[in-house]
Image: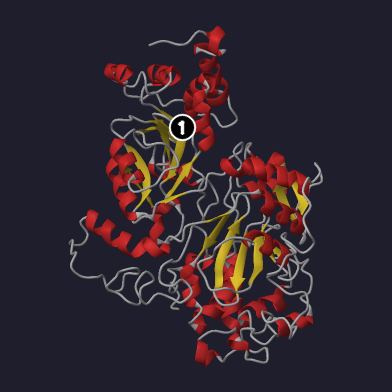
Amino acid sequence: MGFVRDEDLEWGPEWIEERIREDMIESVDPLPPLGVGRVVPEEYFERFGGVFPESVLYIWRRFGFDGFGQGRSWITDPVEWAPVVDAWLEGIDLPFPPQRWHCLTRTALGYMLLWGEISGPALDIDVINGEIAPNASAAENMTDPVVRERSGCTVFTSPLEDVYDDEVTGRSLAVEGIERLGVPGADEVLGFVPPLSFGGQVSADRLSVQKAVPYLVGLAQSTPRYLGADLMAAWGGAATQFLIDQGAIPNSTSTPDGQGGPGASGASTPDTAGDPDDLGSPGGQVGSTGLGGQGGSVGFVRDEDLEWGPEWIEERIRVGLLGYHDMPPLGVGRVVPGEYFERFGGVFPESVLYIWRRFGFDGFGQGRSWITDPVEWAPVVDAWLEGVDLPFPPQRWHCVTRTALGRMLLWGEISGPALDIDVIDGAIYPNASAAEDMTDPVVRERSGCIEFTDPLEDVYDDEVTGRPLAVEGIERLGVPGADEVLGFVPPLSFGGQVSADRLSVQKAVPYLVGLAQSTPRYLGADLMAAWGGAATQFLIDQGAMPNSTDTGTPGVPGSPGDPGGSGGQGGSAGSGGQDGPGAPGASDLDTLGDSGGSGDGW
């Protein structure tokens, strides 16, 4: 085998060496080789000569199966990693022709890039949250020999990166893990045991060194796996619509007034407080009543009944918001209008109204988190939920808190804090566990507090500096206002680097409404539905409990033998017993303990 001539393909070994030098060795975040790479067996070059492009084989000869950047990235042996690939793809209906897939490169935490023998580098797998993300654009590019060869190089020289941050330190989880545990070997990963999908904090002190292949095979069996959205498939039309919305190109179609768009019917928050003609309004004929009573009266249920109250909220503010999260208020909060307390008295728990009185619509932590006005943000909620089939009863949803980059936590009038929206990647995450908890008045009240005192956080890192994207953006652009977000224009879904120098200050509501129309939106997985059975199987696989297949597992959510479990026959009415709780980041209630309670004795 050999390279196609440079004059035909306009690339070759010199181009690869340039990419190695510029993108790996001399980049802002250099990834020098460890120099411990096992030599690739000679028979591999014949075996895979017609499977991978020559550029892959060149990299193999150049480095072997080496690691880079203190073990943050590794070239993998596709034969040794075949059982991992098989385990993660088993039962997944991929949007590509049937073919064999090989793991070419992976990260310290096990994030994998797969190369299909037909489709090329068209799959990557996030083993922490279970997402298998397809890339149809990469598959289409395999018909172009130049792009195919260059792709075989760039999968190594611009490698995958672990995207998770340590929730305690705010630094990269992989970097923290390597500093604590040392550089992992070629046959090792840093992993969570039990898996992070079972709950708990994203913290490097929970990581341990695991043998990569057996650990990741077991993780595939214990982690709910799902096919992520292929964003590229929707970018063409979405980009056009975005440019129309921005006035950059004319709209060639005429839409009759009142049809479609964020102003269409189904608004999440009516413009008139307590309108009796609006059947969904808190003050209307069928508005939910909640703890405030049917007349929308405001007042805490007695502490001796609910075992909580204003004192408990103040403790959470002190210990959680100001202490652990270190997010003091900006002190610029607009006072909540008096009519809101009557209007939303039966919709939100009293704890939310207490926070409103305490802070108003203020920002926290240099603007990283904001309490939102649910009326002003109603068009945003409508735009993001339009056309999405939620696994909850029909109800109104309100945005109660959001981040500097626009990530939103939504409160449903029936289901509570059961949705959060990542506006950058378009994921709408349900949390059926949070919805089920709304039947417990204690948990409902405490949830109303915790959504503010353990606020949502933006999870993206700047790919240039490695620091949190929101922090970088605020340092560059200043603290956003109550009506502002830091946003990408054009949206990140159109491509490009995740870098703070691409952010700009945008008016929150119009920007996010437009973003909803230009970003492919999708319903993220609700992982809790599968946690029970997966947890049982994982413990069996680890030898921690015997394998018993003739009975259900009482007390394990989702067990058929437990009619009260989230996946059992007696699951909550909100999910119909079919969709279980908790996509990644779906509810910050879990940061204080499991979804049924916390370490402080709920």
Residue at (58%, 22%) from the top-left corner?
22
Q: Position of residue 89 (x, y in %)?
A: 36, 44
Regarding residue 476, the answer to whether it shows in the image is no
The residue sitting at 69% across, 85% down in the picture is 284
**Residue highlighted by disc 1:** 121
Q: Quadrant of residue 199?
A: bottom left
Instruction: Point out residue 345 in the picture as x, y percentages from the top left corner.
Output: 67, 84
Q: How is the image coloured?
A: secondary structure
Say few, some or many: other residues with alpha carbon within 10 Å of mark 1 (under 14 / 14 to 19 / 20 or more).
Answer: many
The foreground one among 150 and 215 is 150
**34 or 295: nearer the viewer:** 295
Q: Is residue 367 left or right of residue 584?
A: right
On the image, the x and y values in percent for residue 121 come to 46, 32
**The C terminus is located in which quarter?**
bottom left
Q: Quadrant of residue 386?
A: bottom right
- Image quadrant holding the N terminus, namely top left
> Mark 1 falls on what kind of element?
strand
| Residue nearer the viewer, 466 or 485 | 485
Q: Is residue 501 above or below residue 420?
A: above
**What kind of residue is marked 1?**
Pro
Instruction: Tell whether 73 sits left or right of 334.
Output: left
Q: Which is more toward the observer, 481 or 428?
A: 428
